[in-house]
Image: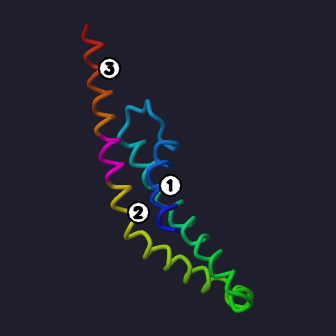
Amino acid sequence: MPLVVLGFLAVVLPRILVGKRTLSQGRLALGIFVTSLLLLVIGALIFAGFSADGGAEVMAAWEEAPSLTAAAFLGMSAYAALVWVPILALVWFAMAQSVEARKGAALAEKAR
């Protein structure tokens, strides 16, 4: 279930963050980078939520060593990145092609 959610967000978040009318590859790259960071954090939160259902051991770990526990959940999220990174790469490629098509159309319109 977490992988489905992260895969879905890898498709949707860049379109929300970048917008459909941008003509900048730099803005697109920044949007993809921010999406990557968000997906890592969201993945860690999902895994923390599933682990919290496990009981008091997780809460005790949070109280005892919060940074180590957060790092463990970020590590789990990084493993999940094996699934969503290729999806995000394909979305980036498609969006980059769209940006170039819009730039070409704008240039053609300007030349008229």
Q: Nearer the viewer, residue 104 or 46?
A: 46
Say whether disc 2 or disc 1 marks the residue closer to the N-terminus.
Answer: 1
Describe the element under mark 2 as helix, strand or loop: helix
The kind of residue tagged 2 is Trp
Residue 35's x, y, as percent? 48, 55
Q: Nearer the viewer, mark 2 or mark 3?
A: 2
Say whether disc 2 or disc 3 marks the residue closer to the N-terminus.
Answer: 2
| Residue at (29, 21) in percent of width and height | 105
Q: In 3D space, how far apart are the residues under numbered discs 2 and 1 (Cα atoms)?
A: 9 Å
Left/right placement of residue 17 relative to residue 108 reads right
Q: Can you identify the residue that label 2 sits on?
A: 84
Which quadrant of the rendered structure holds the C terminus? top left
Q: Can you identify the residue that label 3 sits on?
A: 106
Task: Note whether 77 is above or below 107 in the view shown.
Answer: below
**Neighbour class for label 3 at 10 Å: few (<14), some, many (≥20)?**
few
Left/right placement of residue 38 relative to residue 83 reads right
Residue 20's x, y, as percent? 44, 33
**Neighbour class for label 1 at 10 Å: few (<14), some, many (≥20)?**
some
State the mark number for residue 9: 1
Residue 109's x, y, as percent? 30, 13
| Residue at (54, 68) in percent of width and height | 43
The kind of residue tagged 1 is Leu
The kind of residue tagged 3 is Ala
Q: Is residue 91 magenta?
A: yes
Region of the chain picked out in magenta, as a range: 90-96
Q: Are marks 1 and 3 in contact (CB under 8 Å)?
A: no
| Residue at (50, 73) in percent of width and height | 77
Dominant secondary structure (helix, strand or loop) of the stretch shown in magenta: helix
